[in-house]
Amino acid sequence: MPRLATHARALLARTLAPVLLALAAGCASLPPNTDRSESLAYRDTADTLLGRGVAAQTARHSGLSGFHLLPDGHDAFVARAALAALAERSIDAQYYLLHDDLVGRLFLHALIEAADRGVRVRLLVDDMALQGKDDFAAGALDAHPNVELRIFNPFSRGTSRALQLITRFGDVTRRMHNKSFTVDNQVGVIGGRNIGNEYYAANPHLAFGDLDVIAIGPVVDEVSAVFDRYWNNAAAYPVTTLVGKPAAPGALARFRRALSDYVAGQRDSGYLRALRESQLAQALRARNVEYDWADAAVVFDDPEKIVAERSRDELKLVTRLQSRIERIDSELIIFSPYFVPGKAGVARLRELRERGVRVRILTNSLASTDVGAVHAGYARYRKPLLAAGVELYEIDKVLTRAQRKGSGGSQKASLHAKSFVMDRKRVFIGSLNLDPRSVVENTEIGLVIESAAMAARMAGWFERIARDQAFRLELETGSNRTESIVWQRTIDGVTNRYTTEPNTGFWRRFGVNLLKLMPIESQL
């Protein structure tokens, strides 16, 4: 027996040795982040074309900022492309995701063209989806003398990311989820969209409902100040520091040529035609873009939140929002694609209802969500919310023919907008989901805008979506006195009732029910 035990231990050691070595490698440290130089947004941009245009507008609205809502994906991309084309001094762009697809390439082409004109481009991207893109990023994009790319909270290079998600859990699992785009420190775009086809009506199979806002006036200086805090933070690594090697000779020229050829090949595509014909493109050509004028403030997570103790509430965006939520006295409308309120969130919403505040929430159904684990976290709170009198609506993935905007094939609808309407007096628009990941783990940014006109439009959107594109959830008490959820949707005057998650199959529901048993809510 002792010999057998010794043999077993030796066998176990040989079996585990590669795993232990791999795990040790997964703990590889990052290089020193000492090569980054501090830079700040340009403040002396009043003499630019955008600066003069903004000054003429703001002169008639002393102290207020101007806002133009972008609910349409085509308009949202046109805004960024048009601003990049008008840039004279700087572009500061901060995104969680930057995809290598049609929209991603159009976006990078716009940045390169601006940089070729002498515009300073600072691009700050989270590292979550950049695996395998270092050579492109450092060898091509960052090689441009007017472009600098920094990666926020990076993974160690040369080491398995999957292992790092285990060995550095609680570190690399905290991400920069911010989305902002600022040109010449004069005009900014803030909201829920990353850079990729699905966010800008370029994916024929997926229709994301999202929301951004163009901002001009004093609030843009605040957006630039927040960008500077992230750009100069120790967690923002120059991509060349991570890669550890210079760009290959000719890499920039090859990248620019390939990008130009690709964009030229798309010039007569249906998508670029749609961009040229978008409502915003027409308004820009006619020089009659309309703005709502209002007081506003930027609310954001301090970048130190990524490394700080999770109890540091003073670093959190939600702390800056809390006083505004507490002042609500009649109505709260919430758009949140990923909604996991937790017990504390349910209690706060119940308190609002007890004060007579009407609370309505639009989120994704199981059929429309792209993250089943988040739906598992949300589902356990539906009954308590409904019991408290909260009105719940879930987006149906099925679009009617009229809602597909000319798409010939099937298209799945999904909500991605993150915004609130408070008392029809003020709105929040930004990157914040109401789930533990956004509230506690990730960093976020948004605008609080004191505009009754914008609040009325957004409330109107909510009501149209709730009526035409969503299920309304209700609690129903059965003969055995147990409560169950019923989903209802009316199409062409006919109301359909569902007693299980609509438009889903058995295995989809089974997988989500299995996830409900797992202790993963803090990561949702």
Image (cartoon, grey):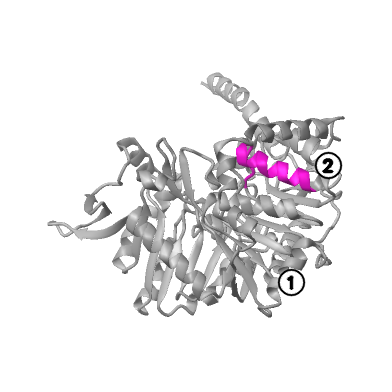
Does the magenta-highlighted stretch encompass residue 274?
A: no
Residue 278's label in the rendered image is: none
Circle 1: is it few (<14), some (14-19), or many (20+) Cα within 10 Å?
Answer: some
Q: Check whether the beta carbons of the residues at disc 2 and disc 1 lie within 8 A of each other.
A: no
* Amino acid, disc 2: His
Find residue 25 and report its horizontal and vertical position in percent: 70, 34
Q: Looking at this view, is 47 or 10 the one in front?
A: 47
Does the magenta-highlighted stretch encompass residue 100?
A: yes
**Is 89 on the left-hand or right-hand side of 375?**
right
Part of the protein shown in magenta:
97-114
**Is 485 on the left-hand or right-hand side of 135?**
left
Find residue 42 and report its horizontal and vertical position in percent: 82, 62
The residue at 41%/35% (across/down) is: 409
Q: In this view, does 276 lie above or below 56?
A: above
- Distance, label 2 to label 1, CA atoms, is 32 Å
Task: Tell me the chief SS of the magenta region.
Answer: helix
Q: In this view, does 481 lie above or below 237?
A: below
> Which residue is labeled 2 in the image?
144
* Amino acid, disc 1: Ala
Q: Mark 2: which secondary structure? A: loop
> Does any portion of residue 187 appear in the rendered image?
yes
> Which residue is labeled 1 in the image?
55
Find residue 315 and report its horizontal and vertical position in percent: 64, 66
The residue at 51%/39% (across/down) is: 203
> Does any portion of residue 132 appear in the rendered image?
no
Q: Is residue 519 above or below residue 352?
A: above
The residue at 38%/69% (across/down) is: 359
